[in-house]
Amino acid sequence: MKTTLLLTTATVSALAFTPAMAEYPERPIELIVPAPAGGGTDNVARMLNQYLEEELGQPVAVLNVAGGGGAIGVNQFSRARPDGYTLLSTWNSPITTVPHMQRVQYSYETLTPITSTSQSAYTLCVAPDFPAESGEEFLAELQANPGKYTYGNDGVGGTMRLAAERIFEAYDITARPIPFGGAGETLQNFLGGHVDIYGGSITPVLPYVEEGQAKCLLVTSADDNDALPQASGLAALGHPELETVLWRMMLGPEGMEEERAEAVADAVARAVEHPEFQEFLSAQGETLNLVRGEALRERLEQETQAIGETLENLGLKQQ
Amino acid sequence: MFESLLNALPVALQFGSLISLFVGTLIGILIGALPGLNPVMAIALMLPLTYGFDPIIALGLVAGIYNGSMYGGAIPAILLNIPGTPAAIATTFDGYPMTRKGEGGLALKTACWSSAIGGIVSALALMTLAPMLAKVTLAFGPAEYFWVAVFGLVSIAVLVGKDVSKGMLSALLGVIIGLVGIDTISGEERFTFDSLYLSGGFELLIVLIGLYAVPPVLEMAEKRNESYFDSDSFRAKPSGGSLGLLRRHWRTWSRSSLIGVAVGILPGAGGNLAALLSYNEAKRKAPDPESFGSGNPVGVAAAESGNSADNAAAMIPSLTLGIPGNLVAALVLGALMIHGLQPGPQLFTRSPDVVFGFMWQMLLTAMLLLLLGGMVATRLFAQVLRMPSALLVPTTLVLMAVGVYTVNGNVTDLYVMLAFGLAGYLLNRLGFPLAPVVLGVLLGPMAEQNFRLTMLIAQNDWTVLFSRPISLGIIALLAVVLLSQLWKALRQRRQSQYQGS
């Protein structure tokens, strides 16, 4: 009896004195996804989560906190204890765009950067009879006809619209944005001939490129895209700095220990190596992209500033 | 095409597929029956578990949950006036009064058959007409969507009840609730009072549960010592059995199923609109429109066949065009892509077994509803009403709270639900009808956004609203509905004058 008690005390004190780093994670982790269950962000987060659980050796519970363009979930997350047991899995807009437009309680400066995971570019496509065959000709045609063409996009403050506006700004182009609810709605209106230009993610429009019903002439990433040989990347046009893409990342609350952030980033790096996850990603039209720690913070800072300028020019910036 | 359809039948009839359909339908009914838990959430949670299996198993599960939940939503709508899913709102109009009259069993049975029939018609449309109907989808631009929304708003005239001015005020209240949030066209905030919560606007489901489900709970609590339900006569068997139902409702079923399919092929319109329009049409065509709202089984039949007929039809734009008609369709697209199947025009030729197999599954699960719905719903859920109020009131409230909380994981949603609950209670007491509020919330934003999109595209040239053939067709329908109402009103007035003199 006495020995058992002694042994127990010994174990407890041993546990208490071992550095936290070696133990983490020692209990289940909660992962906040600031989007509703069933959306793109949620799908990717849940898929990655299956492999992340294996790598961390602890269950990770996904909690969807939707609303406010992601801001409500990130707000709630930013008040969590920075012990590494509450993590955030988000796309870029709630961090780099929404704070310009709404009053939120966080910024890229306060949250702890862990690692980015994947990204996908947007594309601009036109009908087959459009008088342009390349990215350069496309931009020249828009330049020559200010206000003539309509482009469907994912709404005011949507990342696709900002990606397009950044490019148009640099080329002094005026096109008329038509804000739809997302790529599906935009595709419907583009195929029906209700708008001239499709602006949205690549995957939904791909079958129509193969069928010859759409020609995609521009992607919003610096690099060209293998799936769309006719489209120019921004580097090919001489403007790699205008890249705006949809990308996903994991963040911690303000003041999370660096060792723990590193441990999560390592686990993510191992989790994304699973071939099933990579197959899943390519089906979604996304590519792996792992940027960690301070480099991630820099990326967030640059994007926040670039988007802030674009929003200001569009008259959408608050404060 | 019909050959591929036949070839896919054995795929859908595999043991694994049948099991997943069975399980899916059962889960769907339960999910639908618990207010707040919705099929999108259930499917999103289940799909990752099926990635290792054949795609047809994953799709069977989706088909089952989807169709099952559409019927499941009717169960609390009928028994407790709580729409289990937003699409079940029109089911409460007559389903709940039937329960209070002691006809809950009949209402459940009618709902089950109506859901199954709507689902079957819809699946048949998906199987035979998909490529043709997809062309119709593309012809609908913002101008046409605007007219669809106006058509829905005008039907408020049918739902408005006896006091026209109160009905119109209710509709206006709905439109105002729908205005709250960030304007999607300009990015301006409207009625948000600097609150981040309000900037997202009110979630339809939360408004509906608040307005519709909280007031009856409060009323139950008021009458805690009296028997609230006429429970000793819970008649499950309608006179004449299932054949009697068929004879009584076949007209309503065929009309509502057509409306459901038509609404279904328009991405974004949704099952709730299908149900409301079906209900209106049934009421307009009925010889006894005044009996609607006080427990007419035709109302339940119309609403349930309408919303279920939306289901498979909503898959038409997703499978043929790659444009998801609703969130479930978006999840189906996701599931297909994970298995390397790219939705869009080539899907039918490249992987016919999966697509046509899925269509068969949609048909089979609609039929399964008759079996499972009848077993689960009438036998199990009807027992709920035997609970004493002292247990039923808190249980219902807790269920609603859990459901609302799971939508966004946000506690503020619970207070919003309670606030709308109090509002609904007051509106009830003051004699304002609730149905126009719902239509206002649903259709006000749809009409406004699409009007402004039309103006943006046409650069404020309003003649485009009247220059396209589909728009003109909808306007003609509108005129018919309005004039027939007017004529009916005039004739009634003349009759009453004649009798009075």
Image (spheres, coloured by chain):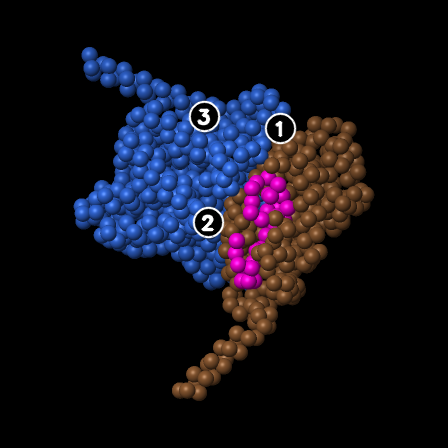
The residue wearing badge 2 is B410
Where does label 1 land, which residue? B457
Give the chain of mark 2. B
For badge 3, the amino acid type reads Leu
Q: Which chain is brown?
A: A
Question: Alpha-carbon distance for marks 2 and 3?
Answer: 42 Å
Assign the C terminus of chain A to one quadrant of the image.
Answer: top right
On screen, residue B57 above or below B467: below
Q: Position of residue B38 (x, y in %)?
A: 44, 50
Mark 1 or 3: in front is 1
Please determine whether, in this image, residue B156 is positioned above or below residue A280.
above
User: What's the CA distance linking mark 2 and mark 1?
Assistant: 37 Å
Is residue A215 rendered to the left or right of residue B310?
A: right
x, y percentage for residue B242?
Answer: 29, 47
How would you rate the neighbour count of disc 2 (Cα within 10 Å): few for under 14, some for 14-19, many for 20 or more? some
- Colour of chain B, in one word, is blue
Amino acid type shown at disc 2? Asn
Please report the bounds of the magenta region as a residue range: A79-106
Tag 3 residue: B477
Badge 3 marks a residue whose secondary structure is: helix
- The chain containing the residue under callout 1 comes to B
